[in-house]
Image (tube, rainbow, N blue to C red):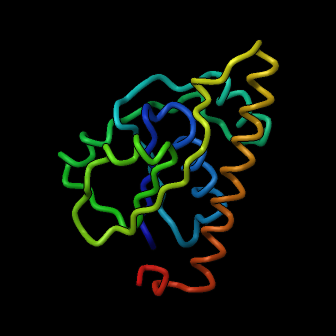
Amino acid sequence: MLHVLFVCEHNSARSQMAEAFLQRLGAEEFAAESCGLEAGTINPLVVEVMAEEGYDLSEKTTRAAFDLLKQGRSYDVVITVCSQKASEQCPLFPGRALRLNWPFDDPSRLEGDREARLAQIRIIRDQIRKQVAAFIDEYKEKGLSMFL
């Protein structure tokens, strides 16, 4: 089983969605966790759009990457789901972790009324689900050779 860590800026939206998708869609091959560069507060609009798809994030808490690092945690794959610039602030975890960056828009920076932001978050949610599914497919096709 591969251990995958998703990281975004505050662990309040994108990394939480990616973790939930990988836990369900890749449960046989992957153990997924998420954290932020800093711990934040989970975005209630993200909780709402994930509930539309049958994912309950209402009781999720946020965690900071450096707390996991201090615990000596290691991962096979570390995927940042924020901008390239923000991802460069992510600590290096011990081991031979494959590092990937999937830059998705930040739901906390969306503008517009509630309905407009919900619509945009649904798009981000669907993009994340598609990327996670592609990652699972690539692993099933290439196995551990995807690390080479």
As rendered, which of 72 and 146 lies closer to the eye?
146
As rendered, which of 140 and 31 lies closer to the eye?
140
Count of marks, rendered view: 0
Is 73 placed left or right of 40 in the picture?
Answer: left
Q: Is residue 12 above or below residue 132?
A: above
Where in the figure is residue 116, as x and y percent of width and height? 80, 21
Q: Is residue 96 above or below residue 128?
A: below
Is 66 placed left or right of 63 in the picture?
Answer: left
**In which quadrant of the rendered view does residue 36 lie?**
top left
- Residue furthest front as drawn: 85
In percent of the image, x 55 and y 48: which residue is there?
103
The N terminus: image quadrant: bottom left
The C terminus: image quadrant: bottom left
Where in the figure is residue 29, as x and y percent of width and height? 54, 72
Is 19 placed left or right of 84 in the picture?
Answer: right
Where in the figure is residue 18, as x and y percent of width and height? 58, 49
In percent of the image, x 53 and y 26: which residue is there?
42
In percent of the image, x 63 and y 60: which residue is there?
132
In percent of the image, x 65 and y 59: which residue is there?
131
Q: Is residue 146 above or below residue 3?
A: below
